[in-house]
Image (tube, rainbow, N blue to C red):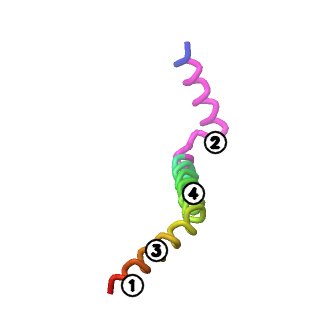
Amino acid sequence: MWSKTVTTARGALRRAGLGDVSGATAVEYGLVGAGIALAIIVAIFAIGEDITSLFGTVQSSLNEQR
């Protein structure tokens, strides 16, 4: 039953000129990439102060041991 529905829907899309959906995959990958980039940026800003403080502590420890 579903295969006939899918076949009918594909035929209707082709007749309407919307049968080619190959660009949709590229758009989906672009959206996934943008989401990952946004998550990385948010994570960097969220822990940025902590990382700066950590490197400052390490630098102070190294300077004390000289």
The span shown in magenta is 4-24
Q: Secondary structure at mark 1?
A: helix
Q: Amino acid at mark 4?
A: Ala
| Residue placed under numbered mark 1 in the picture | 63
Q: Is 58 drawn above or below residue 36 in the view shown?
A: below
Question: Mark 1 or mark 3, which has the lower sequence index?
Answer: 3
Viewport quadrant of the N terminus: top right
Q: In this figure, which residue is indicated by the disc labeled 4? A: 34
Residue 35 in picture, x, y percent from top left: 58, 53
The answer to whether mark 4 and mark 2 are in CB contact below 8 A is no
Tell me the CA gap for discs 4 and 2. Answer: 29 Å
- Residue type at mark 2? Gly
* Mark linked to residue 57: 3
Where does the image place residue 46, in percent across and percent down from the top left?
59, 61
- SS class, disc 3: helix
What amino acid is at disc 3? Thr
Residue displayed at 64% across by 30% down:
12
Q: CA distance from mark 3 to mark 2?
A: 63 Å
Name the front one of labels 1 and 2: 1
Of the pair 13 and 62, the residue shown nearer to us: 62
Q: Nearer the viewer, residue 51 or 32?
A: 51
Which of the marked residues, 4 or 3, is nearer the chain's N terminus? 4
